[in-house]
Amino acid sequence: MEPPQYDPERAVIPSPAQLRDIRTAGDDRFLLIADLMSGCGMRNGAAFAVNLNNLVADDVYRITEQVNQTTKTYGRLKHRKPTDYRDVPLPARIRETIEWYADKHGTVDGYLLRHPQDPTKPYLVYYLQNQWQRIKRADEVNIPDGMVIYSLRHFFASNCLTNGIPITDVAEWMGHKSLDITFKIYRHLMPGSIGKAAKILDVGLAS
């Protein structure tokens, strides 16, 4: 038997202008999460577990855990063993956001994001979802149909691939289980994509 084909929906990716407006449309927590997802490619669960101790270099963040939405505790990364981690690029602007947030709001054992009503507990996904819904209802930011919070992570992939960063690196940084997943979602963003190939082939056909 052949496994079912993975057929992802087309990613709706914010433009740089849309991202600029979206990231500042909520509170400080929303801005931090938006920057971590769009700038470092984190899943929201990993962004909720952001920790100052994981700034391992000026331009590298080490993702070691995520908030498990079932257990509501810190746990291993998706598709990883408990001791595994992955290092991702840390753009200067995202590092500045992390340091700004820590200076303004403080940390608990290095963690920046905590439960708003109980700082002994992790930040949970429904707080982010509630903000996203409020932002959409306010209709003050241009959010195209089909755009979801996960689209912030799509922006990271788009920014990498349209600037020629190898898809193998992007797949590793995003924590995809296989390169095939990354390719099927984002291949249209790569230089030398199907669209570009079609134009090149058309030149030969017209000669």
Image (spheres, rainbow, N blue to C red):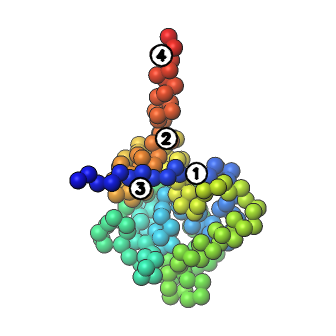
Name the residue: 60% across, 57% down. 147
Name the residue: 51% across, 72% down. 48
Q: Callout 4: 10 Å neighbours few (<14), some, many (20+)?
A: few
**CA gap, disc 1 to disc 2?**
12 Å
Q: Which three-letter amino acid code belongs to the residue tagged 3?
A: Trp
The one nearer the camera, 63 or 188, is 188
Q: Reply above or below: 1 against 76.
A: above
Q: Residue furthest top?
A: 207
**Which comes before the other along the chain, label 1 or label 3?**
1
Say left or right for 28 vs 95: right
Name the residue: 67% across, 60% down. 22
**Which comes before the other along the chain, label 3 or label 4?**
3
Q: Position of residue 143 (x, y in %)?
A: 68, 57
The residue indicated by pointer 4 is 205
Name the residue: 48% across, 43% down. 161
Q: Nearer the viewer, mark 1 or mark 3?
A: 1
Q: Which three-letter amino acid code belongs to the residue tagged 2?
A: His
**Which comes before the other along the chain, label 1 or label 2?**
1
The residue indicated by pointer 1 is 13
The residue indicated by pointer 3 is 173
Q: Reply above or below: 78 against 73.
A: above
**CA gap, disc 1 to disc 4?**
33 Å
Q: Reply above or below: 79 against 20.
A: below
The residue indicated by pointer 2 is 188
Q: Position of residue 127 (x, y in %)?
A: 59, 77
